[in-house]
């Protein structure tokens, strides 16, 4: 019997979006729920770029002053951080917003994801980028930092650095980001299953599982 073609789950996200980090955990739980009913379910994850703050300067800018301006006051921002920390803790994610110094422009991070994804599954790299942003306080817009992260994930640092120092992948990333918006994506994370059904937001795993099962029904 031929092996079924894996389903494709496209994840539209940005590595500076905390709910995208939480969304990854909820997606994994949703996949477990799907496999309870469909043990043979197989999928591949494909990452699509989104610029949560497209006006971010190319060199970045100080993080906390921007966030306070965005949300209106230190007190309101503290409440938002508390809600995110609480949601993250339920999934084993320890958010350390106090360690973040720079509001990163994520173009090069998305280029690196694209570069890796052309070669292999980029899930480990994406996970490491989220950890760098939200747990280690690394500037994920810095090309040297990104080359080091690539090396940690098993890729040649010099090769990654040379790629990041070029313009390779830039037009492809910008095109994919624009395409996602044309599809109607306006919030992240957004999960698109087989280009047939999808859901926006870091939804409850049961809602994500239901969306995936809808795609199963369409294929069947």
Image (tube, rainbow, N blue to C red):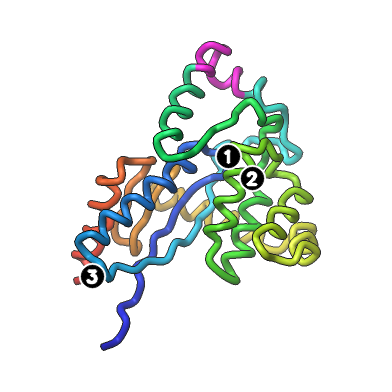
The residue labelled by disc 3 is 219
**Disc 3 and disc 1 in contact, CB within 8 angstroms:** no
Q: Which residue is at 44% across, 24% downward?
A: 83
- Say what secondary structure mark 3 lies in: helix
Q: Which residues are magenta?
A: 67-78
Percent from the top left, x then y, of residue 32?
Answer: 31, 56
Q: Is residue 100 above or below residue 193?
A: above
Q: Is residue 73 magenta?
A: yes
Q: Which mark is residue 106?
A: 2
- Say what secondary structure mark 1 lies in: loop
How packed mark 3 is, by other alpha carbons closer than 10 Å (few <14, some 14-19, many 20 or more), is: few
For marks 3 and 2, give the CA distance: 35 Å
- Is 194 on the left or on the right of 123, as rendered? left
Q: Which residue is at 44% across, 54% downward?
A: 11
Percent from the top left, x then y, of residue 36?
Answer: 23, 59
Q: Does label 2 or label 1 sit earlier along the sequence?
A: 1
How packed mark 2 is, by other alpha carbons closer than 10 Å (few <14, some 14-19, many 20 or more), is: many
**Disc 3 and disc 2 in contact, CB within 8 angstroms:** no
Percent from the top left, x then y, of residue 124?
Answer: 56, 57
């Amino acid at each position: 019997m031929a092996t079924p073609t894996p389903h494709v789950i496209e994840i539209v996200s940005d590595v500076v979006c905390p709910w995208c980090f939480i969304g990854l955990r909820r997606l994994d739980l949703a996949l477990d729920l799907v496999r309870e009913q469909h043990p043979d379910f197989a999928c591949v994850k494909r990452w699509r770029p989104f610029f949560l703050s497209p006006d971010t300067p190319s060199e970045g800018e100080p993080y906390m002053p921007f966030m306070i301006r965005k949300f209106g006051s230190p007190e309101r921002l503290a409440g938002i951080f508390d809600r995110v920390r609480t949601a993250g803790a339920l999934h084993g994610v320890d958010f350390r917003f106090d360690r973040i110094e720079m509001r990163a422009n994520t173009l090069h991070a998305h280029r690196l994801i694209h570069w890796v994804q052309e070669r292999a599954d980029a899930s480990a790299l994406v996970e490491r980028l989220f950890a760098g942003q939200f747990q280690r306080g690394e500037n994920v817009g810095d090309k040297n930092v990104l080359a080091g992260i690539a090396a940690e994930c098993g890729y040649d640092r010099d090769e990654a650095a040379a790629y990041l120092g070029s313009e390779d992948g830039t037009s492809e990333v910008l095109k994919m980001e624009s395409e996602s918006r044309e599809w109607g994506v306006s919030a992240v994370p957004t999960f698109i299953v087989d280009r047939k059904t999808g859901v926006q937001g870091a939804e409850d795993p049961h809602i994500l599982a239901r969306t995936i099962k809808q795609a199963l029904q369409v294929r069947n």
